[in-house]
Image: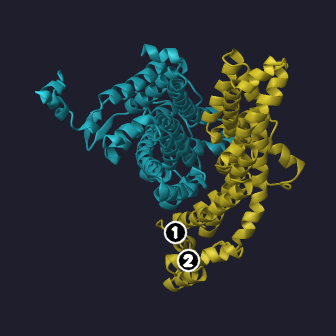
Amino acid sequence: MSLRRFAIKRLLLVIPTLIGVSIITFALVHLTPGDPVDFILDIDPEVTDADRAAVRAEHGLDQPVYIQYIDWLTGMLQGDFGTEFATGRDVGDIIATRLPPTIMLGLFGWVFAIVIAVPTGIYAAMNRQKLGDDISRFIALAGISIPNFWLGLMLILIFALWIDLWPAVYTGRGSVYSLDALWFLILPGVTVGTASSAIMMRIMRQSMAEEMNKDYVTTARAKGLPERTVVLKHVLRNSLISVVTVAAFLTAGILAGSVVVEVVFAWPGLGFELIEAVNTREYYVVMGITLFTGIAIIIANLAADLIYAVLDPRIRY
Amino acid sequence: MSTERGRIQITGFNPERVEEREQLSDWVGDTKGESASRYQRAWSRFKRNRTAMLGLVIVSTMVILAILARPISVYGTTVQPISLAPYDPAARLSLDPEVQAGTYDSPSWDHPMGTDNEARDLFSRILYGGRYSISIGFVVVSLTLTVGIVVGSIAGYYGGWVDEIIMRLLDVIFAFPGLVLALVLVAMLGGNYWTMVLAFSLFGWAGYARLLRGEILSVKEEEYVMAAKAMGARDRRVIFRHVVPNAIPPVIVQATLALGTVVIGVAALGFLGLGLAPGTAEWGTMLDAMQATLIQGPGGTIPWWATLYPGAAIFLFVMSINMIGDGINDAFDAQADVKVGDQGGQ
């Protein structure tokens, strides 16, 4: 199969997935008991049934479920994500303002993961069954096992409270793009990136170890290449294929991790907003962010498959 | 005469024995021996793995401690009378005149892990807290594993449009981070023990299904499967007797690791204040109550123990689970590259 045909086939598969994702998002929020109108109006005891009906009609909640779904979907196709019940803010705007901080946090985590994982993985693969390998593998296992919210809390405890190098939580003063914010992002970035880094390091080590046993490595050694050249020029290139793929797949993990980590550090991103919205039953915000997350992951997986197909022609079955 | 001379006499052939063996598809003597010995060999390899055994010891200890922490009674009958935890995990010790304890007492002999914001003994709470996380983990993994194995077997074995539909469904599920789905679901339904189980089970089976499907696609091509089919074995029998047992080891590894993931997920929901009721002695919920004290410690001091110990309990449990998972993986994986000489010995 040519690369183009593979790409087209893979792109077409995205369409049913997107439809499914929108259905699940909608169903999660709408098929569960609990009425957002009660939640919004219950504060006021003098609400009449007419008021409830008015609020319902305003947000289209009096329609049958499938009509609501179609309305929501057609709205979104036109860029209308609905509005927040309490404030009337546009959900699209909310996502647009909350997205950049999450992307910054994700990038920090991602860069941290790669910077730590790739060299450690190479080192571990080259020193297999030695002390250094054992130690780095143990640390990687710990990195996978540690709950990210607790890691965040412990980092705050140590680096913000005992050593006082960082502010404990984001105070909201100054722009998210300022130098202060960048400095602040180091702790959350490390927190988000730790698990991904550990997973990537293990995969790096594994795939390098497998490549090392292949015939071309023996050939390269036999023709007298120094070990350094063999590893960096031949083995590394081939084993990076799997790392690139995994890096794209890890986007899901980083996105999920950022929900919790943003709460720990009070970082004003999508995850922080999602938790607030979930607590106040802001249907459209919850659906908007959930759907947005789903689409981001679909795109990341698509990218991973395409990159893999470009790097390794065998995959285009 | 001539006919008699040309006759070939066959001796030692008893047609009745063939008739006894008529149901060839039920004749599993060899297969059984093979697969049993395969699992036995994996177990003996696992036993020699010191890291994995350490993990197993820690996990078992934590499970036993959680069970023995406080007495368990079912409908008024006490089934487990032992009480290892020195104090009731829900008791506010400052109200008890016999115990000298206040809020945020630092660790001491009486309270090895200190006390929390409501003067409850943290050590007792952590022992007891394992009950929630660990039991939710085991329930979720058994549920999702069952569904995942059935769905994955069907998709992998039948292929075609059944497989296509299941795979598209899995694509949709994998487009969400599991934690986000669980979070929204628990928030919408309200947090309690069974909604947490539901939230993690509803889509949690997808991972096993995909993994098993892939394994089955490769096992399906093996000769023994063709042999079973040629002998007239029914689909159900071929799937669950021949294909699944040979495709299952990676799924077991995944299930072990998933136990850790679910425990972290449950704790994360607790930490976000969405899980069990506030004040419950669940590890994540305990951390939630402590988070504010990090930013502003009561009376200027920071009760670090109240954050350190509940999280350390989660970490220790999950780490041990992952050590077991890695051990199982190694034990089965070594199977794949058995040296030729090794097989002769078996």
Can residue B85 be spotted in the picture?
no
Helix or strand or loop: what does disc 2 sit on? helix
What residue occupies the far front of the structure in this picture?
B2
Chain of the residue on which disc 1 is drawn: A
Q: Is residue B12 left or right of residue A147?
A: left
Mark drawn on residue B275? none
Q: Is residue B27 above or below residue B270?
A: above
Q: Are marks 1 and 2 in contact (CB under 8 Å)?
A: yes
Task: Work out whether mark 1 precedes mark 2 in sequence or the reverse, and give the earlier one.
Answer: 1
| Residue A229 vs residue A58, the one in the foreground | A229
Can residue B172 be spotted in the picture?
yes
What's the colour of chain A in the image? yellow
Q: Label 1, on which residue? A: A30
Q: Residue at x 66, y 51 (%)?
A: A259
Q: Is residue B289 left or right of residue A204?
A: left
Please tell me how crowded label 1 is: few (under 14), some (14-19), or many (20+) other residues with Cα within 10 Å. some
x and y percentages locating residue B81 in the rendered image: 30, 30
Q: Mark 1: which amino acid?
A: His
x and y percentages locating residue B163 in the rendered image: 49, 55
Mark drawn on residue A68? 2
